[in-house]
Amino acid sequence: MALTPDALLGPSFQMSFAAVAGLLAWFEARKGKAKPPPPETLAGKALRWFAAAAAVAVMTTIVAGLATAPFAAYHFHRTTPYSLVGNALATPLLGIIVMPSVVGGLAFAPLGLDGPWWQAMGFGLRGVLAIAETVASWPGSERFVFAFGETALILFAVGIAWLCLWRTALRYLGAPAIGLALALAAFPARPDVVIDASGRQIAARGPDGRLAILGGRASSFSARVWRGADGEAPGGPSPDGGRCDSQGCVAPLSGGGEVALVTDARAFAEECRIATLVVTPLVAPKACSETAAVVDRRTLAATGALELTRQGVAFSAKAARDPAGRRPWTGPMLRDPPPAEALRLSFATQPKAAGPPQDHKIVDPTEPDDMTGDGEEP
């Protein structure tokens, strides 16, 4: 932690710490329990040893799985409900067959007697793979969950730490924190529009409540992350809510109106009049912001990727990068900083009546019009 304090924010540290803390607390709680008298026969002792090893392996899997589940859901937006079953079945094979075979194989390798050990290891691994494939084939073996905020994650961490650190009945006071975290995670705030840092691909929430991907490929990394964070399988079918042509895309928005992704400056004149929100990798004409909410190249250069949430006739924004986040070690973010109005993270828009879908119309850039933009590529 002294050398790499940023590790505290990563899933590797958080999941490892939670798993180890949970296991230490569980084993500590077992210390005071009375043990039954040992069996008198050798067979009974061997059977009891195997049963104890299997029980410890199963409980280790359950405790570690429960402790790491909130962090896995936060970082990867997915849960595997049957992983506890799969791990509980596979762990005894690993602990009783695979790992001892590895030790035996290494020990007997100098004598040339390691073959049977590797065969035993292979037998155990084939069993592990068979269990994994079987469990993964069950319906609902993988579920995607909505991305929830840091408040829920902190409550999960506090509740788990409280349960693990106390040795008396006070430990159960951590349960309310975990319960509140579950409630917050079950009903997270979901953005209406997500915009990548280039402005060439967006995800817009339609009237059906699902995210439609506009621009780029629906299988792109950004699209997969967005859909996974929205509780949908990244590989599943994408809602067919958008219409695209050579000048950009349009899609209906939840709550009425449309979002337009403009990739050709000739579309500004039409889309700025029709759309509620205009997103573009170009520099939008200033007049466009008088009739629509606008996110253009200047805005994205200062903020990076954006999440927009509709609030009446405005969009509140959450930026990947704080426009004012200049630090001594980062240097100037931009050689030519955008004007102050381009750094605003709240985009006011004029309410527009929802109407039938509009087609893109090509505007002759030679005609006098203050909404043709500069057409400049990023």
Image (cartoon, rainbow, N blue to C red):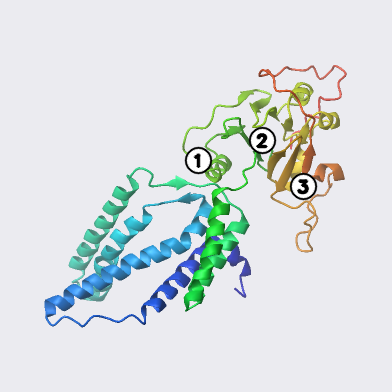
Residue placed at 66% from the left, 19% from the top?
A: 357
Which mark is first along the chain, 2 or 1? 2
How many residues crowd around disc 1 within 10 Å: few (fewer than 14), some, or many (20 or more)? many
Return the x and y of residue 163 as percentages of the image width and height: 49, 71
The span from disc 3 to disc 2 (Cα, nearest Å) is 16 Å
Q: Which residue is mark 2?
A: 200
Amino acid of disc 1: Glu
Label 3–label 1 contact, CB within 8 A: no
Q: Any mark on residue 232, and which?
A: 1
Residue placed at 46% from the left, 36% from the top?
A: 236
Which mark is first along the chain, 1 or 3? 1
Asked which secondary structure carries label 3, the reply is helix
Which quarter of the rendering shows the N terminus? Answer: bottom right
Q: Any mark on residue 261, and which?
A: none
- The vertical placement of 309 against 320, above or below, is above
Residue placed at 88% from the left, 18% from the top?
A: 368
The answer to whether 219 appears left or right of 248 in the picture is left
Mark 3 or 1, closer to the camera = 1
Q: Any mark on residue 302, and which?
A: 3
Mark 1 or 2, closer to the camera = 1
